[in-house]
Amino acid sequence: MRSFVPLFLVGILFPAIPAKQFTKCELSQLLKDIDGYGGITLPEFICTMFHTSGYDTQAMVENNGSTEYGLFQISNKLWCKSSQVPQSRNICDISCDKFLDDDITDDIMCAKKILDIKGIDYW
């Protein structure tokens, strides 16, 4: 019972931050600068994001010893830094946790790097 009280207090004092669940229309506005990047149309990006993350900014998926983060499901094996994979190449030069917030500016910048290096086949 004693361990329940502190846990209960933490839950009250620090409520969970809900994930941002984007709609297609919201994403279309936010991603209009990426339309045509790497030869990929905006509808292709929107469809890909639906199938990878369900438009959820806090989506995290375990995949073959790595974790994929955020809307674009960016892997900590190559693209971002996490404590799970300290030897990551961190090509996007960013902490993976940054892909879990509602500001997708850095997500888009990393997605462009991924497109430059791997193309749409990454997803």
Image: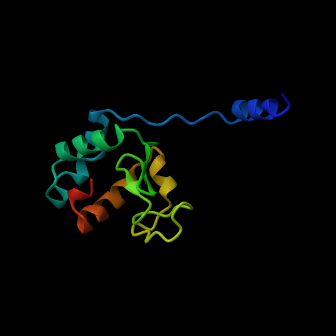
Indicate left or right for 75 with 2 as reference: left
Residue 33 spot, x, y in % from top left: 24, 52
Viewed as shown, does residue 74 lie left or right of 15?
A: left
Residue lying at 81% horizontally and 30% vertically, measured from the top left: 5
Q: State whether residue 120 is above or below residue 30.
A: below
Q: What residue lies at 42% left-to-right and 42% top-to-bottom?
A: 57
Quick one: 33 or 80, which is closer to the camera?
80
Quadrant for residue 46, please give it.
top left
Q: Residue furthest right?
A: 2
Q: How many marks?
A: 0
Residue 77 location, quadrant: bottom left
> Residue visible at 13% across and 58% down?
39
- Apparent side of residue 40 relative to residue 55 in the rendered image (left or right): left
Counting from the top left corner in percent of width and height, residue 69 is at 43, 50
Q: Is residue 18 above or below residue 95?
A: above
Rendered image quadrant of residue 2: top right
